[in-house]
Image: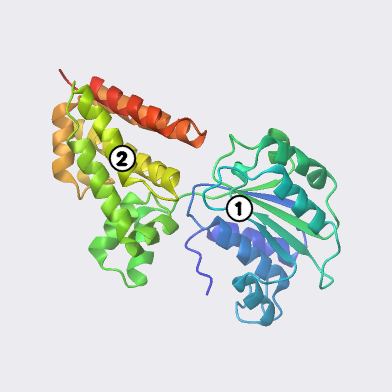
Amino acid sequence: MLEIVGHNGILERLRQAVVKRSLAPSYLFAGPKGVGKFLTARYFCMSVFCEAGSEGRPCTECFNCRRVLNGNHPDVRYLTNEEGKLSIGIDEVREGIESVQTCSYEGGYRFWVIDEAQRMTDEAQSAMLKTLEEPPPTLILILISQGEEQLLPTVISRCRRINFKNLSGAELKAFLVKKGYPEDKADVASRISGGSAGTALNFLQDSELWDRRSALFSILDNLVPGDLWQALDSVTQVEDLCSGKSSREHMLFCLDMAASLYRDAMLRRIGTADSLLINADCAQILDRLTSVYDAPGLERAVEEVCSCKFKLERNVNARLAWQSLFIKLQEFALS
């Protein structure tokens, strides 16, 4: 079953393109992680191939729809970044280009969906330019990206852009409750996920994420201003917390959580209502942070956490990035 939360305007736009056969040769699905971009790409493929739908709405049950849902339709090719790899290289893109140059297996359109397109190296993106400029007549290319700053302007300019936004907290909470999750857990998950249905579902389905969040907040809560050795020990604790095959992804998750915590503390410091807080379930930690930092210090803390994430996304040495972060978090505290 394909369940897309929200984005009704985008779905209608794609349906109309199918009905009017005004399909662009290339699309850029741009927006935050976990909001449904990949699911929408599948919905689009189903809309084109569906045998029983009407007005551009796929039935989701016919032979072609099931093949798209199961990932085995011969005219839908996916390029996804392998777990643990930091980038999509030129060889992978060249292989994909070669495969989509041939005619459709079933005499219609062909789709090439590239997930996390922002991970393509500059060389890989450059290799794709000719395909974007002179696409095969029945090829539809969909680039799915979380950020544009890593995509070449020449790539962006050759795609029809579809912008995705985060869901509202109320919209996401209602979706989670409808799926059977308790209202209190759905409320917390909708807040801390930042409007991402995928992230919220991960939280509710994976207890390790809750545990990692709690452990990280404990590390931040116990950070003692001016104690250099404790700052260095905190780095070791984070490394242990994020160990494993997806260590860097775990660290990026922790940085997102840290940014949300300091953001909440800053809002609480200036008297913002708790209803606007992301981590409203962590009132004691927020109270301590507001006693240790003033509002400018908390604002600088958020900026420094975001800077650390930027470094890790660009493959800077993780230990050095975390050491710098914890030392600066100590410096920002009230004397």
Colour approach in the figure: rainbow
Give residue 100's quadrant in the image. bottom right
Give residue 189's quadrant in the image. bottom left
Residue 149 lies, in percent from the top left, at 58, 34
Residue at left 41%, top 42%?
A: 252
Residue at left 51%, top 65%?
A: 4
Residue 242 lies, in percent from the top left, at 35, 46
Front-lying residue, 59 or 105: 105
Residue 223 lies, in percent from the top left, at 19, 32
Kind of residue at badge 1: Asp
Seen in the picture, residue 180 relative to 191 is either above or below; the reply is below
Q: Which residue is mark 2?
A: 238
Q: Secondary structure under badge 1? A: loop
Give residue 12's quadrant in the image. bottom right
Kind of residue at badge 2: Val
Seen in the picture, residue 183 relative to 24 is either above or below; the reply is below
In the displayed structure image, the side of residue 200 where residue 293 appears, left or right: left
In the displayed structure image, the side of residue 34 where residue 82 appears, left or right: right
**Quick one: label 1, few (<14), some, or many (20+) residues within 10 Å?**
many
Residue at left 27%, top 26%?
A: 329
